[in-house]
Image: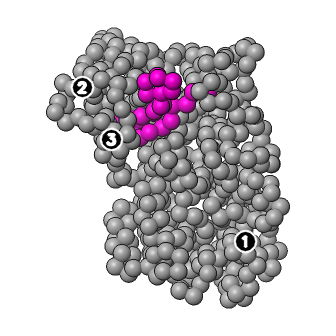
Amino acid sequence: MMQSGALRVRAVIFFLTLFCVSASLYSAFFYQRDRRPFTEWPAPAPVSEDTHVSLDTTVNVDNSVSIGQIIPQEWEWVTSHNLTYPLRYSSRAITTREVPGLRRASFTRIEAPLFEDFHTVESVLDVKVSPTQVLELEVPAFKKEPVNASHLIFGIQTTIRRLEDSVPQLARWIANTGAKLYVVLLEAEGIPVNTERLVGLETSMRNQGFDVTLFPAHEEDTFPQRYFSLVNVMYQHRTSLTQWVSLIDDDTFFPSMHALLAMLDKHDSGEQQYIGSLSEDWWAVQHYGFMGFGGAGVFLSLPLAEVVDAHTDVCKNNLRSSAGDITVMDCIYTHTPTKLTPVSDLHQADMHGDLSGFYESGRHHLSLHHWKEGSVFGKGLPMADMHLVSDVCGECFLQRWQFGDDMLLTNAFSITTYPKGHLKSGDPNEINMDKLEETWNSNMNMRHSLGPTRPRLVLEEEKIQYSFLNATVCDGGVRQLYFHTGINGDLDTLLELVWKEAGPE
């Protein structure tokens, strides 16, 4: 009976995987923007960056079915990403099992390979689910229900177009949480926002679960004045529940509201508190000050916001910089004895160029910033789609697993291979994966924020990177695509992961 039950479970996993693969390949053409509400997980326990867990738990599933037989006549390819045929393709189904008390590891070794067979695909109808193993990964237990963040108010100043572009990623962490959001808007710098467009966007956001209020900026206000005025706006709209007000940018992203609230709970909101993060660039800290840099998220307790609000006019009209976060710092340091409490897991991300080393570090991030700057496809990172996998495995977003001796998965960012032995234990070229790879432009001093670091590897020689392309929700799981452009006559490669939660034992 136990063996029969196990076979039934495997059969369910297999057919669900087929459904996810077929539905998600189709959706890759029509890039999804509407997503289901964000689900959350408890704050992680503190974990050393050199935590390693050895797992090798796989379940055999033996069948081969043509995807073209499931949804015929409805396939086109990923034209929006300009992929070309023929290409190499492989897939893997992963189930995640929650383990109470398990910590999120920065780096986990798996003996089994991530992919077994690669196929040359001349048409999407050629894509098949080959005999393979379903890989089971253990993850920390996490909550599915949205967090209660009704004691937080967030404020943004931006243009309406940038806000429209940011709605999908904002929905991943703030919608349906009870947190309030106030946004000061312009059409563009120096151009008042169109009222009809503002009202339409506000209505749309509220229909998606945002507790949001949009309003036009004062035409006479400069950039730093608009930013600084958010403290006044949020304080004046406080409720009996409000404990914190937060200034953020339109491209600030919080991967876990539960983790964010757990951090804030360590600080007494009944006292004056100024919480944020320094820039990762020590030069910026030296030149701009010991302050909370805005893109990482700046948090003021209500007692401190009250003092800043009381000095709005004098602080707003005595600027020494064109940066709003500097104005907030100046007002706090001029009128209170409160000093910044830096939180290193909040990230301004002041690097430029290739930020792969930052995202592939496996470290825990309370906030991410500058994700709009670009990716391998010349667009901003699709943060909302990247984050979908957290619905299945919670803290596994950007978590790392090594498979075999040469492949590394940074969940929802990249799959990388290291052909010269950099991942192989005992190899002369073995690298310390606890050190962050310096992939960005220029030689910045970041030891205070991102250290320890290591030199960048040479792409296509020492490190081959399959970048996250797209993801979509399918019944009971999330499907991801990763892509690598072939060089020197090699075919392009498309890799697919289908994630779902393991059923009850």
Left or right of 167 in this view: 270: right
Q: Secondary structure at mark 3?
A: helix
Left or right of 477 in this view: 100: right
Q: CA distance from mark 1 to mark 3?
A: 44 Å
Q: Please give the residue where the numbered disc 1 appears in the rendered image.
A: 326
| Residue 499 locus on image (x, y percent) | 41, 32
**What kind of residue is marked 1?**
Ile
User: Is residue 311 highlighted in magenta?
Assistant: no
User: Is residue 485 highlighted in magenta?
Assistant: yes
Q: Please give the residue where the numbered disc 3 appears in the rendered image.
A: 79
- Mark 2 vs mark 3: which is more N-terminal? 3
Q: CA distance from mark 2 to mark 3?
A: 16 Å
Q: Residue at x 52, y 70 (%)?
A: 158
Left or right of 110 in this view: 50: right
Q: Secondary structure at mark 2?
A: helix
Q: Residue at x 77, y 60 (%)?
A: 284
**What kind of residue is marked 3?**
Thr
Q: Please give the residue where the numbered disc 2 appears in the rendered image.
A: 125
Q: Residue at x 44, y 15 (%)?
A: 116
The answer to which quarter of the image holds residue 357 is: top right
Residue toward you, 261 or 452: 452
